[in-house]
Image: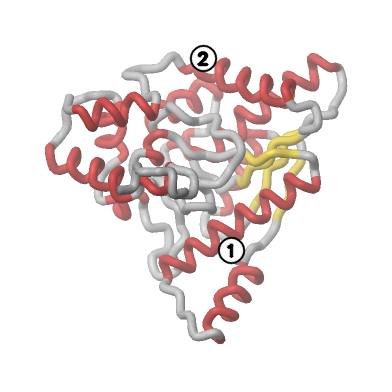
Amino acid sequence: MDKLQNHIRTILRVKRRVNPEEEIRARVDFMKAFLRAHPVIKAFVLGISGGQDSTLAGKLAQLAINELNAEQNDISYQFIAVRLPYGVQKDEGDCQTALSFVQPSKVFEVNIKPAVDISVESMKKAGIRLSDFLIGNEKARERMKVQYSIAGACSGVVIGTDHSAEAVTGFFTKFGDGACDLIPLFGLNKRQGKELLQVLGCPKSLYLKTPTADLEDDKPQLPDEEALGVTYQDIDDYLEGKPLAETSKNQIEALYVKTRHKRYQPISMYDDWWK
């Protein structure tokens, strides 16, 4: 294992193997401890997309909320699941399956299409034409804006779905789905997230489905692995320190270096990591 791979594995905290029950317990306890330490906060907020990551993060959040309410013998805490379709979502059935599995305290649905379309059209009138890829970023940022507005209105914080297999590749929108207050999946790779969902009794259809951000209209349901140019299996192997093809290793490390700005706070004149 070379120096860069060892560095990446260390900062992203990925274990070679996990005990799913222990990981579930540790992550639920982390979220409970956060709420206990901040009495003014009474809710977790998360957009539910129907994919593996939001399903897992949502289930862990709801478990934390249920336990805290049971311990206090009241219902002062809540997990708020947010549906954020752009028009009609093609995999809406998966979203509803995820909601049935998570059983959130409350569900809101906000269609982001009007807000995104007005923003894009306003820029077009100003002479700024966005590519389909950049419009996808607009969607991701609008979704996060809505989640933060709901969190503000409900004395809550926003849960993120980022995990180490996404972090290493920078496969998230800066200040979009990359913006959040807590990241309960940090340290897990994609296959380890599946292991946790299996133990939690999640329907197989949710964690076996092909991962897709589904942000680009010109490429609907584009698989993550196609967009990345490398499979999650290879990414997971890399993070676990397993041998893999040199081409895959090089692609992962190239993505890591290219997207490192996403994993840092805004740059000041006192920072030098970017040079």
Q: Residue furthest right?
A: 74
Q: Residue furthest left?
A: 246
Q: Residue at x 48, y 68 (%)?
A: 135
Q: Residue at x 55, y 30 (%)?
A: 184
- Residue 99: percent from left, percent from top: 64, 40
- Quarter of the image with the N terminus is top left
The residue that mark 1 highlights is 86
Task: From the viewer's side, name the closer residue of 102 and 178.
Answer: 178
The residue that mark 2 highlights is 21
**Left or right: 79, with 163 as reference point:** right
In the depicted structure, whether residue 249 falls above or below residue 123:
above
- Residue 216: percent from left, percent from top: 44, 64
Q: Amino acid at mark 2?
A: Glu
Q: Which mark is residue 169?
A: none
Q: Residue at x 51, y 46 (%)?
A: 178
Instruction: Count every numbered label the image shows and give the total.
Output: 2
Q: Residues within 10 Å of mark 2 (few under 14, many from 20)?
A: few
Does residue 225 show up?
Answer: no
Indicate the secondary structure of the residue bearing disc 2: helix
Does residue 130 show up?
Answer: yes
Quadrant for residue 19, please give it.
top left
- Residue 205: percent from left, percent from top: 48, 39
Q: Amino acid at mark 1?
A: Tyr
Q: Earlier in the sequence, mark 2 or mark 1?
A: 2
In the depicted structure, whether residue 3 falls above or below residue 247:
above
Indicate the secondary structure of the residue bearing disc 1: loop
**Left or right: 59, with 21 as reference point:** right
In the depicted structure, whether residue 30 falls above or below residue 235:
above
- What whole-number distance in Å separates the C-alpha atoms at marks 2 and 1? 35 Å
Indicate how the structure is coloured in the image.
secondary structure
Q: Residues within 10 Å of mark 1 (few under 14, many from 20)?
A: some
- Residue 159: percent from left, percent from top: 61, 38
